[in-house]
Every structure is written in C-alpha cells, then in structure tokens.
Amino acid sequence: MRTSLCLLLLAIGAMRLAAQPEQRRLYPPRTFPPDIISQEELPRDIVRVASTHVRVDFENDRTRVLRLTLGAGESIPLHDDRAGVLVCIAGCRIRFTMPDGKTQDVELKAGETRWLPDARRVTRNLADGPVEMLYIETKRPRT
C-alpha cells in the first residue's frame, strides 16, 4: 500500500512538471547554500588579489616579506594588509585608499621605511615611473 501510494505521488508530481516545463523549479535552488559570510567580510590576501604585482620573497611562521612592483599609475585592488614595515627600494609616491574613501599619500626616498597598521586598502602608484617596495608583514602567533 505504501509503495503504491509513493508511486502515485511521484507520478502526479512528474505529470505536473511535464505539463509546465517552463515553470520547472531547479533543485537545489541557485541561491543554495545561503551566503553565511558576505564577500565583503572575506579576507583578501594581496598575493591572491594582485599576483602580477606582488611576490613572496620570504615567509616563516612570524613574518612574510612581499616584493611589490607597480608601473606608473598602476594600482593593487582592494586587499587586506597585515601590520608591517614598508621599505621603498627606490623613491616612491603611493596612495592608500580605504573602503570609506579616505586616502593617505606616502612619499619615501630610497631606503626609507614606514610602519603601516593592518587595514583593508587599495594601493596606487602616483609616481611617473615604476616603484619597487618591500612589505614586511607581521603574523599573529597561533594560540
């Protein structure tokens, strides 16, 4: 009895779907699974975001050294930077733009350094020529 009832329900469902193919529901729905974390909350590692401009020179469990090269007017899209030290190999003029629109212009001579706090930002080269920088990131110890 149960088997024939199940078969009957399946047949009715199949007839309804066959009668209206343009209104067929797709399972699972395209929005499944729901977005638990918005894309804005996900970390954006600079190496992943700008692999053509950034390479890892050194990494261990406490530090990561990144080499950034940007041509005149080029920029690195929105990314997350850990706190660290920025070292300009040659003179550099760069602009950091935060998600809220605030900007910070930094101009350093060759070999000068600047401490930068961790932040989400866009980095843009304001110089007329290419710039090369090292960014020495600090890593949080695992607990």
Image (cartoon, rainbow, N blue to C red):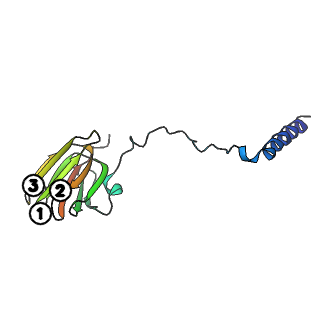
Closer to us: 92 or 47: 92
Q: Earlier in the sequence, mark 2 or mark 3?
A: 3
2 and 1 marks in contact (CB < 8 Å): no
Q: Report, in whole angstroms, how far the alpha carbon at label 2 lies from the one at label 3.
A: 12 Å
Instruction: Identify the amino acid type marked 2.
Output: Leu
The image position of residue 113, as x and y in percent, is 11, 53
Question: Callout 3 environment at 10 Å: few (<14), some (14 to 19), or many (20+)?
Answer: some
Q: Which mark is residue 126?
A: 2
Q: Report, in whole angstroms, how far the alpha carbon at label 3 lies from the one at label 1.
A: 8 Å
Instruction: Identify the amino acid type marked 3.
Output: Leu
**Residue shown at 11% from the left, 63% from the top:** 90
3 and 1 marks in contact (CB < 8 Å): no
Q: Which residue is mark 3?
A: 108
Closer to us: 106 or 41: 106
Question: Callout 1 environment at 10 Å: few (<14), some (14 to 19), or many (20+)?
Answer: some
In the figure, residue 5 lies in which quadrant? top right
**Residue shown at 17% from the left, 53% from the top:** 94
The image position of residue 13, as x and y in percent, is 81, 40
Can residue 59 be seen?
no
Q: Which mark is residue 90?
A: 1
Question: Does 139 sit above or below residue 37?
Answer: below
